Image (tube, rainbow, N blue to C red):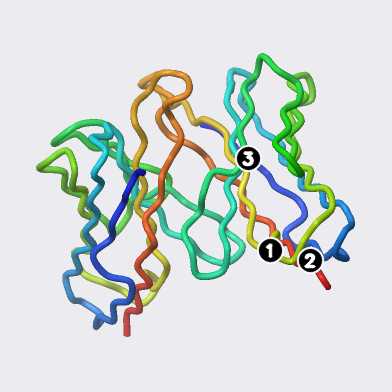
Amino acid sequence: DVKVTQSSRYLVKRTGEKVFLECVQDMDHENMFWYRQDPGLGLRLIYFSYDVKMKEKGDIPEGYSVSREKKERFSLILESASTNQTSMYLCASSPGLAEGKNIQYFGAGTRLSVL
Amino acid sequence: GENVEQHPSTLSVQEGDSAVIKCTYSDSASNYFPWYKQELGKRPQLIIDIRSNVGEKKDQRIAVTLNKTAKHFSLHITETQPEDSAVYFCAAPNTPSSGSARQLTFGSGTQLTVLP
């Protein structure tokens, strides 16, 4: 059974703080993703990674960066948190690229509040 | 990139009735269309998917249909039950200029409420 674990379920930070959201998967998946989920906007891709140290921007990368030093771990970084980054953040992983391999498995989410 | 539109945003049905959620996509090369269900407070989970070489796929009370010509696909839930209440997301592959369709573009979601 695939397990995608996000380090925190709830997080409260102050404006201007540096914030780290951590995600770990235990199935040796190639691809990992960070989304933010806001009401009425669905799941919007922030960044994804298809290999260690590789990353690609998604639809809304501004204000975020990522790090993938090990295959199983993908971190989302808010360099200077702002109130408009208050949201639910979801991490996901998928096995590979070939057809049938882009099923995504999600973590439980981190609800971040920036005050 | 891919653009996915999902309708309706909210849907209420009586228990036992059917529910239909529709999505359109823009990239005619897209060949894989999953549906995810997110129950309140839980993570999204894949419930069914369809590939472009078939027009319909069923799994018990849920089915997905695909019309490649019109570039739309739909989720059908029959004999709805209270536990079907959730947010449903459709998705389609997003093939960026690098050519690798690793990403999915998600629809905006449909909140389905099944009334007892």
Q: Position of residue B66 (x, y in %)?
A: 74, 27
Residue at far top of view: B53
Q: Secondary structure at mark 1?
A: helix
Q: Between marks 3 and 2, how big is the CA–CA gap?
A: 25 Å
Q: Residue under mark 1: which chain is it in?
A: B
Q: Residue under mark 2: which chain is it in?
A: B
Q: Is residue A11 left or right of residue B72?
A: left
| Residue with the mark numbered 3 | B4
Q: Residue at x 41, y 18 (%)?
A: A98
Q: Nearer the viewer, mark 3 or mark 2?
A: 2
Q: Secondary structure at mark 2?
A: strand
| Residue with the mark numbered 2 | B114
Q: Position of residue B82 (x, y in %)?
A: 74, 66
Q: Nearer the viewer, mark 1 or mark 2?
A: 1
Three-letter amino acid code of the residue under disc 1: Glu
For mark 1, does the 10 Å Cα neighbourhood hold few (<14), some (14 to 19), or many (20 or more) residues? Answer: few
